[in-house]
Amino acid sequence: MKEQEVLLEVKKLSIAFRQKKQRVPIVHHISFSIQKGETLGIVGESGCGKSITSMSLMGLNHQTETTGDIQFEGQNLLTLSEKQWRKVRGNDISMIFQEPMTSLNPLMTIGKQMTEALFTHQTISPKEAKTNAIHLLQTVGLKQAESLLKKYPHELSGGMRQRVMIAMAMLCHPKLMIADEPTTALDVTIQAQILRLLKKLNEEMNTAILFITHDLGVVRQICQRVMIMYAGRIVEEGTVDRIFQKPQHPYTKGLFASVPSFKEKKEKLVSISGHVPKPGTIQACCQFAPRCPYQMPQCLEKEPPLQSIEPEHRVACFLMKGGENTDSPTTTSESTDKAL
Ligand code: SF4
């Protein structure tokens, strides 16, 4: 059993863009935490605010208005200067992206990039830096690590580049790694290898992982807890076991119903009708109401609060009146679990 100690606590985080003097809210008052060594998944359709939330944890939302509180080991990250951020990034919190070529420098060898990252954060000799880089490349399953140091990113396959990215993200043994759709661009076999690798790093180094994805199957494989986001809000959150067995929010149920299954023949895959509302068009009501098969008059009058229905299960829906939403026009809890 891993140590249960809060590593990161996000309170009432709101993010908005300024567009032609107009304020366009993207993320609205979300609160969540990550324990040391935990893997938390954030799931949602494109435009739900999951990536921009993760960018704010790295201090990379330069063009936005960000308010709230992001406590990381006792300091509010939102108050850091750029100089202070440079110490946190890579050292305490690191990030891996979907496409490594966007973050690896194409003009520098892998060895140069890795050792420079080490020199930025540690007082270390060139020989030690090289030894550490080789060790990490081996840890992420790259053979002939020494000769790899002399190669440029374009000389590697997509899977190798992603492993290099992970090795670079692990260079300073960060306490939190943010993985933003890191396997989406990879084929299924390489995807499985990368997920196994992340799980191994999480278990062996106790690195907490915030895993951003739209793929519930990936969440099932790697995460302990999951948070479902819709239109910049958290609509459901809980342990993976609980959410996969008893999803409650109509949006979560819709996501599960739209997942194809090899184990169980579904008559047809159910898609969620409609679209995520565009930023700036958000109304003071349940944001999912236009797409929700359970819509009630009160859903159009105000937003449902995110509330606990079990110790480790929170849901934002007016159907939750101290109990579970057992009605389900789209899927059953049993089929949800079997589907993945
Ligand atoms: Fe549907 Fe109403 Fe629940 Fe929103 S609050 S998800 S509209 S039932």
Image: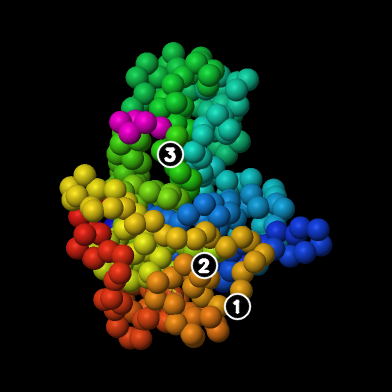
Question: Residue 233 got which mark?
Answer: 2
Question: What segment carries the magenta color?
Answer: 186-190
Amino acid type of the residue that numbered disc 1 sits on in the rendered structure:
Ala
**Residue identifier under label 3:** 184
Residue 193 relative to residue 281: left or right: left
- Where is residue 115 shown, x and y percent of the image? 54, 27
Q: Earlier in the sequence, mark 2 or mark 3?
A: 3
Nearer to me, 165 or 123: 165
- Where is residue 149 shown, x and y percent of the image? 48, 18
Amino acid type of the residue that numbered disc 2 sits on in the rendered structure:
Arg
Amino acid type of the residue that numbered disc 3 sits on in the rendered structure:
Thr
**Residue 142 can be seen, yes or no:** yes
Identified at 72% across, 53% down, the residue is: 63
Identified at 27% across, 64% down, the residue is: 331
Identified at 57% across, 71% down, the residue is: 29
In this rendering, which labeled residue sits more in front, label 2 or label 1? 1
Magenta-colored segment: predominant secondary structure = helix
* CA–CA distance in space, label 2 to label 3: 23 Å
Identified at 48% across, 54% down, the residue is: 45
Residue 79 relative to residue 301: left or right: right
Nearer to me, 292 or 240: 292
Ligand 1 lies under 8 Å from the Cβ of mark 1 = no
